[in-house]
Image (cartoon, rainbow, N blue to C red):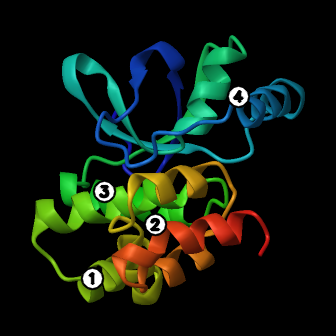
């Protein structure tokens, strides 16, 4: 059933998530809304998959839609099967797709960028070229990883935004927590 580029209907049970997918966070509210939309209006765009182990298909792009289809009890989902995508290209596609989503936590993005750079040994500018993600965004996200855990917690809780966190990361280490605390309290 490999139809490179054509939309085909695939059993939801025959699709598995990519264990290396950079995105790890899926909000329950977002999935509920997407599930409802799939049930009421149908699937608007197909997900991208590639042949996987044991006759299954591994998701390249569209895991949220697959999860929503599964949660909604759908038996099939429209897919484009890509048998021309290797691991590196799969990760690039996932990073690019996740960059377009506003609900990806900045530290999750940062960890994904770091993992990709370490795995494939490319520069930030090469990652930018391959994914279309601005190099400044990549370097800013990576800077977040240097912050102490207490500042990470404030960022994850939404007490400080990614822009403020990047600016805090540029400060001397001994000032970072105090500034993060001041920013989160509105001072």
Residue located 47% across and 53% down the image: 150
Q: Give left or right: position of 87 versus 108.
A: left
10 Å crowding of disc 4: few (<14), some (14-19), many (20+): few
Q: Residue under circle 3? A: 91
Q: Is residue 128 depicted above or below 23 in this figure?
A: below
Q: Does the CB distance between marks 3 and 1 fall below 8 Å?
A: no
Q: Position of residue 181 (x, y in %)?
A: 62, 64
Q: Where is residue 110 in the image (x, y as percent from the top left)?
A: 39, 63
Disc with the residue nearer the chain's start (3 vs 2): 3
Q: Quadrant of residue 158?
A: bottom right
In the picture, the quarter occupied by the C terminus is bottom right
Residue located 46% across and 57% down the image: 107
In three-dimensional space, the C-alpha distance between marks 3 and 2, rounded to whole angstroms, equals 9 Å
Q: Does the CB distance between marks 2 and 1 fall below 8 Å?
A: no
Identify the mark at residue 96; answer none if there is no mark.
2
Q: Quadrant of residue 58?
A: top left
Q: Is residue 5 depicted above or below 26 in this figure?
A: below
10 Å crowding of disc 3: few (<14), some (14-19), many (20+): many
In three-dimensional space, the C-alpha distance between marks 2 and 4, rounded to whole angstroms, equals 23 Å
Between label 2 and label 4, give the one nearer the viewer: 4
Q: Is residue 29 depicted above or below 121 in this figure?
A: above
Disc with the residue nearer the chain's start (2 vs 1): 2
Between label 3 and label 1, give the one nearer the viewer: 1
In three-dimensional space, the C-alpha distance between marks 3 and 4, rounded to whole angstroms, equals 24 Å
Q: Residue under circle 1? A: 124
10 Å crowding of disc 2: few (<14), some (14-19), many (20+): some
10 Å crowding of disc 1: few (<14), some (14-19), many (20+): many
Q: Residue under circle 4? A: 28
Residue located 60% across and 78% down the image: 163
Disc with the residue nearer the chain's start (2 vs 4): 4
């Amino acid at each position: 059933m490999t139809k490179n580029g054509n939309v085909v209907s695939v059993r939801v049970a025959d699709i598995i998530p990519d264990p290396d997918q950079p995105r790890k966070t899926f909000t329950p509210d977002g999935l509920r809304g997407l599930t409802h939309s799939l049930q009421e209006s149908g699937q608007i765009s197909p997900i991208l998959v590639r042949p996987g182990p044991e006759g299954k298909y591994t998701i390249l792009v569209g895991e949220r839609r697959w999860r929503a289809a599964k949660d909604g009890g759908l038996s099939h989902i429209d897919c484009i099967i890509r048998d021309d995508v290797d691991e590196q290209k799969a990760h690039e596609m996932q990073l690019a797709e996740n960059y377009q989503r506003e609900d990806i936590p900045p530290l999750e993005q940062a960890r994904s960028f770091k993992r990709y750079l370490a795995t494939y040994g490319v520069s930030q500018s090469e990652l930018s070229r391959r994914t279309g993600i601005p190099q400044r965004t990549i370097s800013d996200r990576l800077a977040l990883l240097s912050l102490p855990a207490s500042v990470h917690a404030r960022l994850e809780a939404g007490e400080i935004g990614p822009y403020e966190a990047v600016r805090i990361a540029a400060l001397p280490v001994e000032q970072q927590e105090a500034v993060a605390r001041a920013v989160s309290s509105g001072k």
